Image: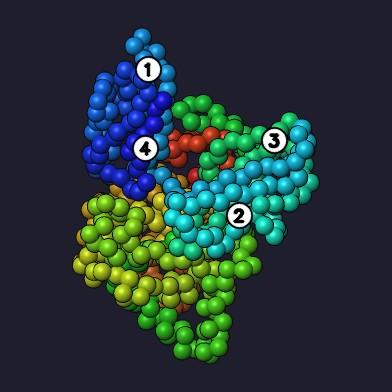
Amino acid sequence: MLEFATLFLSLVTGIHPVEVVVGEAVVSVEIVLDGESVGVIEGEPWKLECDFGRDPLPHELLAIARDESGRTVKTARQLVNLPKSQSELRLILLGAEGASPSAARLVIGSALFVEPENIAVGLDGTPLEFESPALIPLPKTDPSSHHIVTAEVEFTDGSTAHTAITFTQGASGATQAELTAVPIVVAGNAAPTIEFLQDSFRVNGEIVKVSTVERPGGRIFMVRDQNASEQLQEMGWFRDRRLSRSRRLEIWKGSRSIKGRGAEEALFRSVVPIPSQLEAHEASLEKSFWISPLFRIQEAGLDWCASHIFPRPSDLAGGAKNQQVAEALAIAGLKAAGSGRPRVVVLVVGDKKHDASLFGIEATKQFLRALNVPLVIWSTEPAAAQRWGGGTPVDSPKKISRAANQVIDSLDRQWIVWIEGLYVPRNITLDTTRGDLQFAAF
């Protein structure tokens, strides 16, 4: 037996203890971080300190258990600084043995005892209709190719979980494999096929198999510093004065509608960089920031979401001087990467003075690139944007609408390639000769 007793569920940097639980036959355990040995544990306590570095980056943590002869008897693997959920989903394919699956069952479990609020299931990017997640009918599919069933569940506490399963029609007992979602952009915005993408992706120099490719609805996460938030709200009020009260109410209700939400829709979520629980920062960075529910972009528009989706003052504990823009941006990137969908993180800056971030700007931008999450920067104040390497001006309603359209266009150009296996995103590389392909974040 070998299991990690230390689980890293939130964003981790610096030195942390790593503890394992072992069986009787184990005499030593080697801890390996990103391919480099950290040290060897040879008895109680089965623990050592591991340095995850000063900057946020995705990591692969391995524990290798050996017996008296030095033979490897067990390994355990944990991915660090990659999306994790407090809830678990499992897709089960149903049908006669040896035949293609005729239905799927979605099993939903949550350690938080929260209820599912919205369930979306799709086959090869097409939303499926069903009355119960216990029995989701599957249509007939092309027997010559692989197919993918994806499921995403939003819970009543605002958290989400995502899973995917592959199968080949007609294969004996449809095969299931862990998958990694890779967002790409294709030159000319052509529709890529599996054949077009095969042999294009590698991990540690080895070609990895492409299971399928799809273009589901994307996710846009937005982080706004305090000054930018105030200016965007003012511009939102200016827009509201030109609309009737009934129309404003219609937009709000439509943006929060749960029923009828399809897998093809793009959704918006806000992350506020002012910690809501200052004392919780060190214990769990992810829980320190207010994160909005999901909002429908199609109904309201990204410019409306940018100027209307804010927390109540009671949700925040500190003021502008306590804001941690870089940390909130890292959390937004982590959440965006966890969706398994096209994604963009938008940072809106307007305050060049107040930022209590512990993460560096370049390190945070590199973290998003390592997660394959594109970053777009808007600015209501040019001097603030310079700290982040520049940004698109959004100091008027017209400029916000123009910038919002550009973000939506970039989201619509992304495709999600599902490759077989569970990998750290930064370990996945593209064939250097493929000038017609690139990662969405570059």
Q: Which mark is residue 174?
A: 3
Query: Gap in Å between the C-alphas at discs 3 and 2?
Result: 23 Å
Residue at left 62%, top 42%?
Answer: 165
Of badges 2 and 1, the one in the foreground is: 1
Of badges 4 and 1, the one in the foreground is: 1
Of badges 3 and 1, the one in the foreground is: 1
First along the sequence among labels 3 and 2 = 3
Query: Gap in Å between the C-alphas at discs 3 and 4?
Result: 32 Å
Name the image quarter holding residue 68. Answer: top left
Query: Gap in Å between the C-alphas at discs 3 and 1?
Result: 36 Å
First along the sequence among labels 4 and 2 = 4
Q: Residues within 10 Å of mark 3 (few under 14, many from 20)?
A: many
Which residue is under mark 4? Answer: 59
Residue at left 47%, top 56%?
Answer: 113
Q: Amino acid at mark 3?
A: Ala
Q: Amino acid at mark 1?
A: Ala
Which residue is under mark 1? Answer: 25
